[in-house]
Image: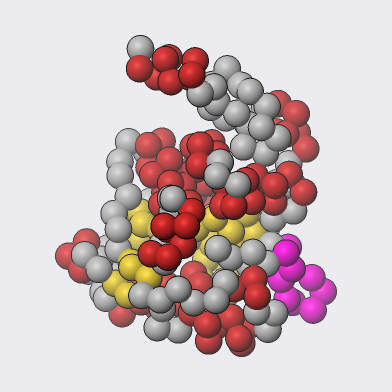
Amino acid sequence: MINALLNLLFPPKCPFCARVLDRPGVCPVCEKELPWTAETETVRKGSGGLRCAAPLWYEELAREGVLRLKFRGAAAAAEPLGGLIARCAAEQFSGEFDVVTWVPVSKKRLRRRGYDQARLLAESACRVWQTRPVRLLSKLADNPAQSTLKEAAAQRANVLGVYAAMNGESIRGKRVLLVDDICTTGATLTECIRVLKDAGAADVVCAAVALTRPDAAGKSRGNVKE
């Protein structure tokens, strides 16, 4: 009854085009037009043990959905987007993680935005699996947004020492699924992986809503981080 009342007062909308829906999810039109990653492209691998699965490329409708969640106050978009993450992570990393966590925003950005979008995504994905995420990382500084830095080396330097492990008993010996909104160069995720492994994590895999599509030079475009 509570859910029915909430849906009446605040009807669910497609996270990509904002069409009103009968139930949380993606509208049929966007379902067909979204830039889905192909099976061989779904997992991005990188240095530092990075493996990040994402169902979408960060472009067109997918980019619009992420921007609405991050910068336009569409916190409710995290529910269907987290559902996409849950489906993708289950397909790519089934049996490879014991605990779910997220890449946190800084306290300053949390106050300004009013919510942590990666945490909402992790909570939504965990509802699909009937569990809850555990906070394993804190952000120590409000560093410049990765989107302001164009060189990969500068992005890696920008996140060094920015994250710290917490709740150590929930990390040691565990296989962690780390959730974020998008994966661009992978610098932020790679640093978080390092921090978690230094704290005793047995392994870390990652999942996001979208990946930026690599260009011919091996760089990423469309970078928007926080």
Q: Residue at x 45, y 73 (%)?
A: 142
| Res. 193 visible in picture | no
Q: Is residue 102 above or below residue 144?
A: above
Inspect the magenta stretch and tell me whether residue 219 lies in it. yes
The percent coordinates of residue 64 (x first, y second) are 70, 47
Q: Nearer the viewer, residue 107 or 3?
A: 107
Q: How many marks?
A: 0
Q: Which residues are magenta?
A: 213-222
Side of 161 relative to 198 (left or right):
right
The percent coordinates of residue 4 (x first, y second) are 43, 14
Q: Residue at x 59, y 80 (%)?
A: 155
Side of 26 relative to 49 (left or right):
right
Residue occupying the far right of the picture: 216
The percent coordinates of residue 11 (x first, y second) are 54, 22
Q: Is the magenta region chiefly helix, strand or loop? A: loop
- Which quadrant is home to the C terminus? bottom right
Side of 196 relative to 24 (left or right):
left
Splitting the image into 4 quarters, where does residue 19 fall?
top right
Q: Residue at x 49, y 15 (%)?
A: 8
Q: Residue at x 33, y 68 (%)?
A: 138
Q: How is the image coloured?
A: secondary structure
- Which quadrant is home to the N terminus? top left
Q: Nearer the viewer, residue 185 or 117?
A: 117
Residue occupying the far left of the picture: 169
The percent coordinates of residue 159 (x first, y second) are 48, 79
